[in-house]
Image (cartoon, rainbow, N blue to C red):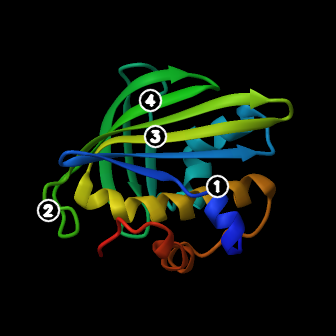
Amino acid sequence: MSGNRAEAAAIGSVIPEGDYATIVFQRVLRHAPEAVWSAITDPAELREWLMCSSAKIDGRVGGRIEMVSGPPQYRSSGAILRWEPPYVFEYEWKVAPVPEMPRGEDAVFRWELSRQGDSTLLTVTYRRITKASAGGFAPGLHAFLERLEAQLDGAPLPDWMERFMALRPLYPAWKG
């Protein structure tokens, strides 16, 4: 997606909730839920668009998820809270303190897929992310979702950092 009109239409919401925030994005992807599900749960596919150097997913409620992902290669782990292929994937995202997240994170990430004809409505919700992290996560997630869409389309993946920098002005909560 490029251009201000397309970016504004795809902007996510950052909803402050005390010391925390919820981030919500929606995208209509021109692929069946099964293809989107594979892209968000298959470690080989995550390696590309989410930049995972490691991903282990024990696909079941109560199973574990462990990832090393994104440009900073954050180490995250948690329990899988909902596993309903190919429609709902929800898990804990626990990260130990690092300089840019001095309190660490103990959030919940949810990926919801709804069939819309030959397409999928993807709703991504990050809950209980610290307010300090949420502002930077919003343009970062926006950039990752562009990479996910490109991967599903078989197109070249946009450079994450370039997109992050271009998207920052759309998310005024970002103070970094």
Q: Are circles 3 and 1 on residues that touch, CB within 8 Å?
A: no
Of the residues shown, which amino acid type is indicated by label 4?
A: Asp
Residue 71 image position (x, y, % from top left): 43, 70
Q: Is residue 1 visible?
A: no
Q: Which image quadrant is residue 79 in?
A: top left
What separation in Å lies between label 2 and label 1 (alpha carbons)?
A: 28 Å
Residue 66 versus residue 80: which sits nearer the camera? 80
Residue, disc 3: 125
Residue 23 image position (x, y, % from top left): 42, 47
Q: Are circles 2 and 1 on residues that touch, CB within 8 Å?
A: no
Residue at the far right in the pictured view: 118
Of the residues shown, which amino acid type is indicated by label 3?
A: Thr
Q: Is residue 20 visible?
A: yes
> Which structural element holds mark 3?
strand
Q: Residues within 10 Å of mark 4 (few under 14, many from 20)?
A: some
What separation in Å lies between label 1 and label 4 (alpha carbons)?
A: 21 Å
What separation in Å lies between label 3 and label 1 (alpha carbons)?
A: 16 Å
Which numbered disc flags the more N-terminal residue, 2 or 4?
A: 4
Q: Residues within 10 Å of mark 1 (few under 14, many from 20)?
A: many
Q: Viewer-nearest of labels 4 and 3?
A: 3
In the depicted structure, whether residue 126 falls above or below residue 169: above
Of the residues shown, which amino acid type is indicated by label 2?
A: Pro
Picture disc at residue 44: none
Q: Residues within 10 Å of mark 3 (few under 14, many from 20)?
A: many
Residue 17 image position (x, y, % from top left): 26, 43
Residue, disc 2: 102
Q: Residue at x 33, y 56 (%)?
A: 134
> Which structural element holds mark 2?
loop
Residue, disc 4: 58
Q: Are circles 3 and 2 on residues that touch, CB within 8 Å?
A: no
Residue, disc 1: 148
